[in-house]
Amino acid sequence: MPNDRRPLIAGNWKMNGQKSDGLSLAEALAQRMKAESDPVFDMVVCPPFTLVADVGNAIADSGIGLGGQDCHTAENGAHTGDISATMLSDIGCGFVIVGHSERRTDHGETDLGVKAKAAAAQAAGLCAIICIGETEAERDAGQTFDVVKTQLSGSVPDGSTAANTVIAYEPVWAIGTGRTPSLEEVQEVHALIREELTKAVGESHANGTRVLYGGSMKPENARELIALEDVDGGLIGGASLKAEDFWAIAQSCV
């Protein structure tokens, strides 16, 4: 990746972790980050909602960012079980994931809904990590480019900038399946994303927007993926639950 886009290593803990687990993980990462004299990467962790406040306290002053895994489109109201972007901001979050493939699949989220969530996040001062990506059936049918273009144009709000938006490409078929795209396939899609972003937000913001790879990045493959021209870090799932693995991925940016 070019030197003008600082790598971002984001951990999505998903629905994992009791309080003791989350604090141990957060504290281990905070210790490592504080020991870095001049880190060349940014790091953010996105724990489940029950742990956000405690994890935020554990990583305070470490340089690690805090994020939520989802937010509602509304600032407040009668939405039982939901949480707003302003609530996340209020407890110290700087990021929120929207449109993750698991939310799109498990909760039927649409591009339009994801765009509304991203807009709410940006309005609350958060950076929206907007997830897009094709399923195995779509990949095998040769629809990858069409799906990525459609989801990107449908999910990114007007007025998005390099400062308030991160794109995460998730080839759904490569998450936890053992099936992985080639480096050439990853770069091809990431380059397409940047090309489409140029049309949507302009060349300057498109060139500055970080595009993360979210298809089972691990310590074993992180360095070669992050070295690709249009890969600016990773949205990490399972490997973010182990401090050693997550930190090793971050060190791949060095």
Image (cartoon, rainbow, N blue to C red):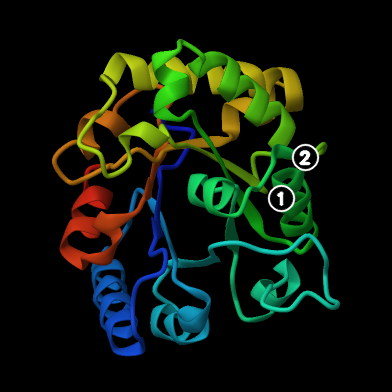
Amino acid type at image mark 1: Ala
Q: Secondary structure at mark 2?
A: loop
- Would residue 13 appear left or right of 24 to someone viewing this image? right
Give the image location of residue 59, x and y in percent.
Answer: 40, 78
Q: Are marks 2 and 1 in contact (CB under 8 Å)?
A: yes
Farthest top residue? 142
Quadrant in which the N terminus is drawn: top left
Circle 2 Cα neighbour tier, 10 Å, few/some/many (<14 / 14–19 / ≥20): many
Q: Is residue 99 above or below residue 229?
A: below
Residue that carries the numbered disc 1 in the rendered image = 118
Left or right of 24 in this view: 204: right
Please name whichever residue, 39 or 98, is drawn nearer the observer in this view of the structure.
98
> In the structure shown, which secondary structural element does the residue marked by tag 1 occupy?
helix
Quadrant, the C terminus? top left
How many numbered marks are there? 2
Q: Position of residue 93 (x, y in %)?
A: 59, 70
In this view, the residue in front, 125 or 131, is 131
Q: Quadrant of residue 178?
A: top left
Residue, disc 2: 157
Q: Tell me the kind of residue under disc 2.
A: Pro
Q: Give the vertical position of 50 relative to 220 (above or below).
A: below
User: Residue visible at 83% across and 75% down?
Assistant: 76
